[in-house]
Amino acid sequence: MKQGPVISEEPTSEVATFRRRVFYIPGYDPFHPRRYRELYRKEGAAQAAHSDYALHLAPARNPGAYGWRVGARIEGRTTEATVEVLVWSDIVRQSMSESIPATYLQLARTAWAYIGSGALFRLMRLRKGPMIAALYPVAVLILQLVLAVLAGWAAGAIAARFTHWTAGLAVFAATVVLLLRWFRARDNQIFAWYLMHDYAYSAQAGGANPAELEARMSEFCKTIRAALDGDCDEVLVVGHSSGAHLAVSVLADLIRQGLPAGRPALSFLSLGQVVPMVSFLPRATRLRADLRYLSARDELTWVDVTAPGDGCAFALCDPVAVTGVAPPGKRWPLVLSAAFTRTLSPGRWQVLKRRYFRLHFQYLCAFDALEGRPDEYDYFRVTAGPLTLGQRFGHRPPSKSRIETPVNRHTGTA
């Protein structure tokens, strides 16, 4: 790997610089991946200040990929990391219909996909938080439609009284459309339309991946495979939210194809995963097969980090076990809690605890109550520190509060 950024502290001559390649797979996110660089820069600086280590970002050297370089001095050792975002935001944007009628049709189809298959009732047995998050956009969009219709009826009735019934009908239709457009334009504050598109994308084929997504995942697999031929010490794949189940399939494909001899350590960190939202659907046979396969492999280390404070994730739910596909030789994932109430200061927790969407991204942010507790989850130690994922967490027992009861009705695998 090429030389990384210059760090203020002098490296020790006795210990070689630790080098890492990080591949980050985001969730269903239509925005440019630069937001993840800026988040890493801002939160990394905050975490370094809290935990008393050095962290510095520099531009990426590879013009064909989006990412950045990280130089650090953590736990007495100099490290270099290259972070690359595996982009599928263009696919996300294409899937988000601009048509209001199409969005409400998506709502009906998505509701039927989960209710008709029985997945909704099974998912409710796991965690209430993500199911409330799933029902939230349905309730909000229906409420908005009702309000728009009532406002349109009132405006149309007034217009018809003073003019003609045809004018009243026109005013009714215009009012409904304009009000729904107004609601959609302000969705960046409540995320109801966005979440509706998110769940609809996963449910549109009953849990099977659309062709364009499969093609992109194949590209991800090739990119990660090329990194395994490099001279780094660890190749770390990070999957956040719905990016976690994409990473499961990408890594399963990668291992099936065969890994090079003398390769770096291969690690997988899943954060805030929502795997059951897909794996419980009837046609998610590909994902269920990959979960089963990956959970028994010794070619990688897989650590799954969630937190009960994150209402959008299936917190502490073992995604393999609850899906009902755990094989006899299951090794992974190691389920750990980010324990927001312990790793965030009381003041910070009070500020964030009702900001549900922001908490879903807390795994990528600084924790201000980690001083003197390096064994706790710290995203920047994991991605820029001098230990592999297995070295950092291999001694940790799984969370005692983890959920492993298989409740899925659909357990068929491809």
Image (cartoon, rainbow, N blue to C red):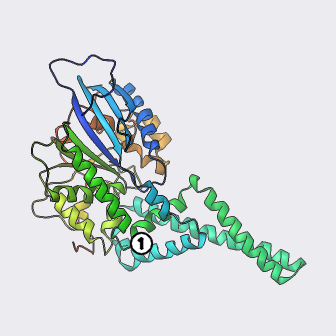
Check the image and name the residue furthest to the right.
162
Tell me where residue 328 sits by quadrant. Answer: bottom left
Task: Point out residue 246 in the picture as x, y percentages from the top left corner.
Answer: 31, 58
Residue at screen point 20% across, 67% down: 325
Front residue (pair 146, 43):
43
Secondary structure of residue under mark 1: loop
Which residue is under mark 1? 204
Front residue (pair 338, 325):
325
Residue at screen point 25% across, 44% down: 236
Task: Point out residue 370 in the picture as x, y percentages from the top left corner.
Answer: 33, 32
Residue at screen point 45% across, 73% down: 110
Q: Quadrant of the C terminus?
A: bottom left
Tell me where residue 2 sits by quadrant. Answer: top left
The answer, for residue 265, to whether it is visible in the render is: yes
Is 238 displayed left or right of 106 in the figure? left
Is 42 displayed left or right of 164 in the figure? left
In the displayed structure, 341 sits above or below 174; it is above
The answer, for residue 295, to whether it is visible in the render is: no
In the displayed structure, 400 sits above or below 342; it is below
Front residue (pair 24, 354):
24
The three-letter code of the residue at mark 1 reads: Gln
Tell me where residue 20 sits by quadrant. Answer: top left
Task: Point out residue 105 in the picture as x, y percentages from the top left corner.
Answer: 53, 75
Could you classify mark 1 by the number of other residues whose Cα lies within 10 Å: few (under 14), some (14-19), or many (20 or more)?
some
In the displayed structure, 57 sits above or below 83; it is above
Q: How many marks?
A: 1
Residue at screen point 30% across, 17% down: 9
Task: Point out residue 372 in the picture as x, y percentages from the top left corner.
Answer: 29, 27
Check the image and name the residue furthest to the front.
63
Q: Quadrant of the N terminus?
A: top left
